[in-house]
Image (tube, grey):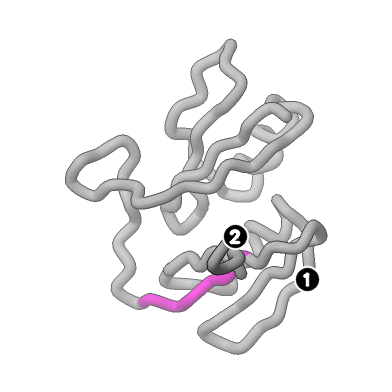
Amino acid sequence: MALATLGGVVLDCRDPHALAAFYIEVLGGTLNDEGDWLELRLPDGPTLAFQEAPDHVAPEWPSGDRSQQFHLDLTVPDLDAAETAVLALGAKPLDTEPGRNWRVYKDPAGHPFCLCRG
């Protein structure tokens, strides 16, 4: 029996509004804006929240000095189309080797995420 359920994932960032805008375009959902705390309620249930952290230092991928700590795996039907879209929204490529079923990017605040072929 599980002790708890996952309520959501929270990303620290300098500008929660900008980062929430990026993920709204990528994942859809509705936004609850409380100023320095925003919650993106996704269509399939989970919540992705954004917390203002003025001294946030983005993780590095791959790196032992400033490890990624965690990353998001986002399942997509078409890797090429999804890549084009996230790059247009401000994502930066980190590891996009052709021929694999996944590619790694960082969001506008520097958090790593993967696009994974579903």
Q: Residue at x 50, y 39 (%)?
A: 105
Between 32 and 15, the one lying in front of the other is 32
Residue 113: x and y in percent read 52, 43
| Residue 50 within the magenta-colored segment of the rendering | yes
Q: Nearer the viewer, mark 2 or mark 1?
A: 2
Between 22 and 100, the one lying in front of the other is 100
**Image quadrant where residue 40 sits:** bottom right
Q: Which residues are magenta?
A: 48-53
Q: How would you classify the magenta stretch by its main secondary structure?
A: strand
26 versus 9 height, above or below: above
- Give the residue at mark 1: 30
Residue 40 visible, this orientation: yes
- Give the residue at mark 2: 1
Circle 1 crowding by C-alpha within 10 Å: few under 14, some 14–19, many from 20: few
Marks 2 and 1 sit apart, C-alpha to C-alpha, by 31 Å
Q: Give the amino acid at mark 1.
A: Thr
Q: Residue at x 57, y 26 (%)?
A: 102
Q: Residue at x 61, y 35 (%)?
A: 115
Q: Secondary structure at mark 1?
A: strand
Mark 2 or mark 1: whose residue is earlier in sequence: 2
The residue most toward the bottom is: 34
Between 4 and 38, the one lying in front of the other is 4
The residue most toward the top is: 99
Q: Residue at x 28, y 47 (%)?
A: 67
Q: Secondary structure at mark 2?
A: loop
| Residue 39 within the magenta-colored segment of the rendering | no
Q: Give the amino acid at mark 2.
A: Met
The answer to whether marks 2 and 1 mark residues whose Cβ atoms lie closer than 8 Å is: no
Residue 38: x and y in percent read 60, 78
Residue 116: x and y in percent read 63, 31
